[in-house]
Image (spheres, rainbow, N blue to C red):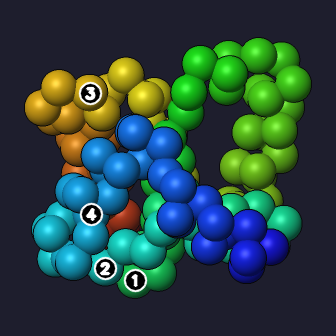
Amino acid sequence: MRSHARDMRREPTAPEARVWRWLRDRRFDGYKFRRQVPVGRYILDFYCAELKLAVELDGAHHGTIDMSDYDSARTLFLRRRRIELVRIPNELTRGDGNDGAGCIRIAIAQITESKNR
């Protein structure tokens, strides 16, 4: 699993490369994200341990029935481990990416707000 994750880091998809430029080196609101992180039998696209937040980029194939079942099982697996998940369609990372970045900021705000209660 780790070697597969390492291979995925070496050859990211175009949307993954774009999002990694936002998240790397604590560029995104000061939070440390890692990419292609193995958790159980899954590999998360991006993960912030401090927030317990996973960011997954979804291509068109995620709209299929098979992927829908897989994504549901994955989400349940992560929730049982108290890991929040934000899914971003690849289209929202194109151009200036403000929509995709906004999805991540909203998730961070919700997590930090719930911690402060």
- Disc 3 crowd rating (10 Å Cα; few below 14, some 14-19, many 20+) is some
Nearest the eye: 69 or 84: 69
Q: Amino acid at mark 3?
A: Arg
Give left or right: position of 45 versus 73.
Answer: left
- Circles 3 and 4 in contact, beta carbons < 8 Å: no
Q: Is residue 43 visible?
A: yes
Q: Given contact means CB atoms under 8 Å apart, are the residues at marks 1 and 2 in contact?
A: yes
Going by the numbered disc 4, the residue's amino acid type is Leu
Q: Earlier in the sequence, mark 4 or mark 1?
A: 4
Q: Is residue 37 left or right of residue 75?
A: left
- Tag 2 secondary structure: loop
- Spatial CA distance of label 4 from label 1 is 14 Å
**Residue, disc 2:** 32
Q: Residue type at mark 2? A: Lys
User: Disc 1 or disc 2, which is closer to the eye?
Assistant: 2
Name the quadrant containing residue 95. top left
